[in-house]
Amino acid sequence: MNLLNEITSNFNFFIIIFLIFTFFISGLIKGFLGLGLPSSAMGLLTFVIEPVHAISVMVAPIIFTNIAQFTRAPNPMRTMNEFKFFALFIIISIFSTSMFITFYPTQVLTVAIGFAMIAFSLNQLYGVKISIGPSYFWHVVVGIISGVLGGLSSIWSPPVAMYLIARNYDKDQFISATGFLFMVGGLPLGLGLYFAGVLTYLVVLQSIIALIFVLIGFRIGEILRKFVSQIIFRNCVLISFLIMGSRLIYEGFF
């Protein structure tokens, strides 16, 4: 009981309910769409907690939901081999960026999260259609961009998704690749935040508790995917991301 009180000491009853709702909904979106976990969570979490704290709390949900997604996708070993250099540069960039997260002004983090959410939403809604061939050059470039964005905001899906769409991967390859690249990014993010001094013992416990509600939502989202029109739900979620991202950018600048 004392430990529970310590974990929730900075939150009143209504904030706790809001946090549970946020983790559940973000897990639901992840289970339904296969991505969007940090985007949806960060847009809501920053209403009640600081961006750095929000990023830290999302570490366990990011890692474990993507482990589940990647390991259940077809041909995981083939995916690992194909994207090993991509993953390497994501790992290096996320770790080196997140290590110094406490040195970045809160406004920078807030704006970075907002731009990441808007980029993610616009890409998913309108799908920037470009076509590129296989090249390790793009793995390096997109890996670095994704990693820097992930280290600043915990959201590195927009560049990854745009690259995979440009390569015209089918649905199974897309799910497998995103699961792998999001999974490997979660580990250095957590390590970098630990060295930055923000991933403390209590924050780790909060992250594990968050994971419970995220996984509940994640599983329900997987089930709902079979019964609900994915296009309608997806577009409603993405439009809400645009609104939340715009709010964060406004707050960061003004």
Image (cartoon, rainbow, N blue to C red):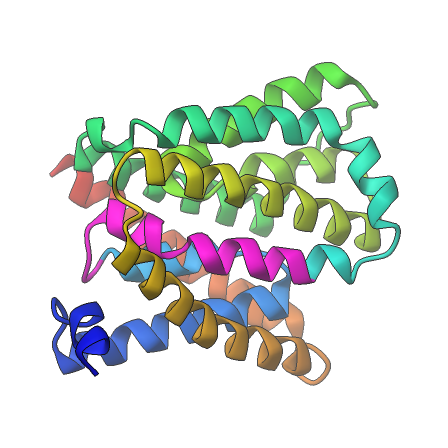
Residue 234 location in percent, x, y? 57, 65
238 in the magenta segment: no
Q: Is residue 82 left or right of residue 48?
A: right
Residue 144 location in percent, x, y? 54, 22
Q: Residue at x 82, y 55 (%)?
A: 172
Residue 140 location in percent, x, y? 65, 18
Q: Does residue 170 sit above or below 107 in this rendering? A: below
How many numbered tags mark residues here? Answer: 0
Q: Is residue 192 left or right of residue 46?
A: right
Q: Residue at x 19, y 72 (%)?
A: 8
**Nearer to me, 179 or 171:** 179
Q: Quadrant of residue 101?
A: top left
Q: Quadrant of residue 130?
A: top right
Report the magenta residues as a range.
Answer: 47-68
Q: Residue at x 26, y 43 (%)?
A: 198
- Which residue occupies the extreme front position in the image? 2
Which quadrant does the C terminus fall into?
top left
Which quadrant does the N terminus fall into?
bottom left
Q: Main secondary structure of the magenta part?
A: helix
Q: Is residue 99 left or right of residue 62?
A: left
Q: Quadrant of residue 18?
A: bottom left
Residue 185 location in percent, x, y? 55, 40
Q: Residue at x 58, y 61 (%)?
A: 65
61 in the magenta segment: yes
Q: Does residue 246 sit above or below 195 in this rendering? A: below
